[in-house]
Image (tube, rainbow, N blue to C red):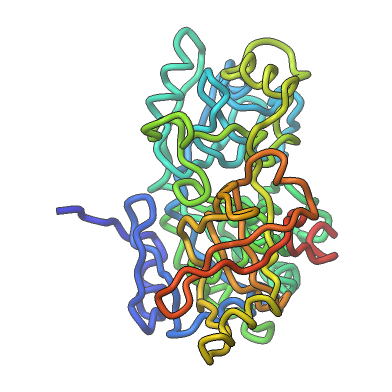
Amino acid sequence: MLNLKTTPFHERTSALCQPQNWRKWAGYFAAGSYEHALDREYWAIRNSAALIDVSPLIKYRIKGKDAAALLHRVTTRDIHKMKVGQVAYTGWCDEDGKMIDDGTVSRLDETTFRLTAAEPNLRWLSMNAVGMDVEITEVTDAVAALSFQGPNTRKVLNKVVETSVDELKYFRLMKNNIKGIEVAISRTGYTGDLGYEIWMNAKDALKIWDTLMEAGADYGITPVGILAMDMARVEAGLFMLDVDYTSATHAWIEPQKSSPFELGLDWTVALDKQGYFVGRRALEREKKEGSVWKMVGLEVDWVGMENIFKQVGLPPQIPGMAVRGSLPILVGGVQVGYASTATWSPVLKKYIALAHLQKPYFEVGTDVRMEITVEHHRQHAPAKVVKLPFYEPEWKRK
């Protein structure tokens, strides 16, 4: 029997979770939603302040003289260029240049980093650290984390922090205090909106939660589960391991694997950095020859979708949450790819999807068709390839 753990915030989240809608996340219970419908939680992300327990993120403290060298070796980013207080999003690959996992690297001081991951990577990190002066410690249970997302979050944080977050730049980290409790606050998130992530000792979790909820009462603060966050991350063009791509360590066959270039992460692959890193030769070759697949955005033509449903006397049936599943994409009746996550976007009023398409069909503006099910029959709704992200508010980086 699988025994799931509870996060340091569970005493609060369990009391607020009305439908008892719990999901499994990295061995923990995670609130899927706090209400029976996702509307209020979704709009808290986009209009006010969403408080999301992200403690199940796997976290490693990497410390020592060779900490930067290890991360430089295993990730695709140029870690040696990172300053103290900087955060970098990155993937890491196998020798064939295929993605194993992705997460963030935070430089806490000259010799200490925090790496987040979707899945356990301790063995892989340790194998690559042989002969190095570095200590790798998993701190998932010891470090609680909150994602605080939405346009009102800065105002709420400034009510409770010792040092204002006004000057904290995008993908930067600062040490701070909330009511005398030491925390780290990073300008990061998984929603594509203005947002922060707050990192703290697990023993302080409930005090931080209560302080934020009280301070945010006049700013629309709302506990938000992972289902509303799932909708927001698709709008932001952000993918998820085991949903939108398969780790190279879990794939059964080669076509199940993806490279950073195929996932649209060209900007994270520092081929100009000095020295060897895992997957370098394969990625250099792919950069030169071009990728056969690309992950892209799709916008479904609403009128076309209406017409398909109209044939059976129904209005369009749209899901109330993001749909995680493989939906074939066709051109001229031939399958050229698949959508991995699709969702209705309330802020855009569009049905959108993240999709993997073969060359040359991944070019922006290409007309395709996405499979939908209408009254138990497969139909194909017209759609168009668009640039990611679907949604990026102007206040996100300000």
Task: Count the labels in the image.
Answer: 0
Residue 327 in percent (x, y) is at 50, 58
Kindly identify the residue that appears in the image at 67 percent across and 34 percent down.
Answer: 261
Query: Can you say whether 370 is above or below 27 in the image?
Result: below
Query: Can you say whether 26 is above or below 222 in the image?
Result: above
Kindly indicate the quadrant of the structure image that contains residue 85. top right
Residue 228 in percent (x, y) is at 54, 71
Residue 207 in percent (x, y) is at 49, 68
Query: Can you say whether 245 is above or below 292 in the image?
Result: below
Q: Let me know if residue 182 appears in the view.
A: no
Q: Nearer the viewer, residue 71 or 327?
A: 327
| Left or right, 243 with reference to 88 | left
Q: Nearer the viewer, residue 74 or 281?
A: 281
Q: Let me know if residue 4 appears in the view.
A: yes
| Left or right, 79 with reference to 321 | right
Query: Can you say whether 111 is above or below 13 in the image?
Result: above
Outermost residue on the bottom side: it is 313
Residue 322 in percent (x, y) is at 52, 68
Kindly identify the residue that appears in the image at 70 percent across and 46 percent down.
Answer: 361
Kindly indicate the quadrant of the structure image that contains residue 308. bottom right
Q: Nearer the viewer, residue 300 or 209?
A: 300
Q: Nearer the viewer, residue 210 or 6?
A: 6
Kindly identify the residue that appears in the image at 52 percent across and 75 percent down.
Answer: 223
